Amino acid sequence: MLRKTQRIVNQAGEDIMADIRHREDAREVPVVILVHGFKGFKDWGFFPDLAERLAMDGYVTITFNFSRNGIGYDPRTFERLDLFSENTHSHELDDLQSVIDEVRAEKIARRYADPERIALLGHSRGGGTALLKAAELGDVISCVITWASVASFFRYSEAQIAQWEKEGVIEIENSRTGQMMPIKKSLWDDLNSNKDKLDILKACANLENPALFIHGSEDATVAPSCSEQLHEACSSYVKRLEVIEGAGHTFNVKHPMERDKPPREYITACDITENWFDNYLNI
């Protein structure tokens, strides 16, 4: 398998670092873009393993860091909290568009990738971002899969909103690193200024792409009811909801992932995902 790290420059001139994987014998195969969530990054937990599994299954896979996700030169450390604090949902949508544009312009895995067959796979907040982009682009996106997706970006408490209004910034603890991660009020302003554009359920109501929603029954971070809402709202004629018994928000994968001992629930999610892509992307 071949792997390449590639720098993509977004519309604001910021760097998006992406890892591209595919088999050496791949020729014009479909592309799967994996979209991480809040406090996520391309090298977190299951992302490298999932990308490799899909690449070995015959796809070009792209994992990438949003330009303002807080990851700096060290690909596994949140050393750019200044960028993290400036992030917004609209900015992440623009970043995802930049990645898609690179694929369609044949600037990623040229000759290996088919720029006319692109799928999105988003986890958690990244699931909402993937759904918004799929609904926006229509048949540019062949199909979409979400893992443990949120159904709304309006997930902040009254206390957090009040703190934004008073101080202009809130802090969220990263339980893994112990860091306090600042989020400026610009994120809240973006949500309120672009309510229609960032309405995930509304996007699902306009979604015509084949859509698969996967969730864990024991997800304590994003309730399984979120994927149920998304599935119900989705207007696609080809849609499916899968709830994996015993799976938590990360399908029981911890960071760093023990790749020689993958959790059963994670393997189940991978198998369902690969089957969906084989049916609706690799055609």
Image (cartoon, rainbow, N blue to C red):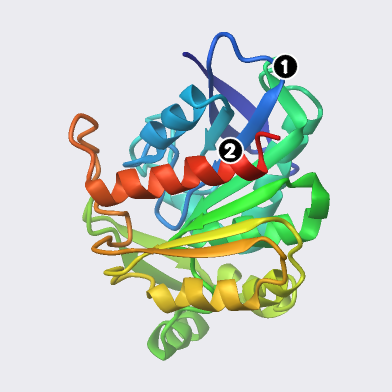
Q: Quadrant of residue 221?
A: bottom left
Q: Alpha-carbon neighbours of circle 2 within 10 Å: few (<14), some, or many (≥20)?
A: some
In this rendering, is residue 6 above or below 77? above
- Left or right of 124 in this view: 77: left
For the residue pair 154 and 212, the one nearer the viewer reads as 212
In this rendering, is residue 137 above or below 149? above
Q: Position of residue 89 (x, y in %)?
A: 61, 62
Q: Quadrant of residue 245?
A: bottom left
For the residue pair 182 and 22, the one nearer the viewer reads as 22
* Quadrant in which the C terminus is drawn: top right
- Left or right of 105 in this view: 45: left
Does residue 88 appear in this view? no
In this rendering, is residue 19 above or below 71? above
The residue shown at (74%, 22%) is 107
- Left or right of 10 in this view: 45: left
Q: Which mark is residue 278?
A: 2
Q: Which mark is residue 136?
A: none
Q: Position of residue 199 (x, y in %)?
A: 67, 75
Q: Which mark is residue 110?
A: 1
Q: Which amino acid does the dot numbered 2 rest on?
A: Asp
For the residue pair 16 and 248, the one nearer the viewer reads as 248
Q: Alpha-carbon neighbours of circle 1 within 10 Å: few (<14), some, or many (≥20)?
A: some
N-term mark: 2 or 1 = 1
Does residue 209 appear in this view? yes
The residue shown at (72%, 65%) is 237
Q: Which amino acid does the dot numbered 1 rest on?
A: Arg
Q: Which residue is outermost to the top?
A: 25
- The residues bearing labels 2 and 1 have C-alpha atoms spaced at a distance of 22 Å
Q: Secondary structure at mark 2?
A: helix
The residue shown at (43%, 78%) is 225
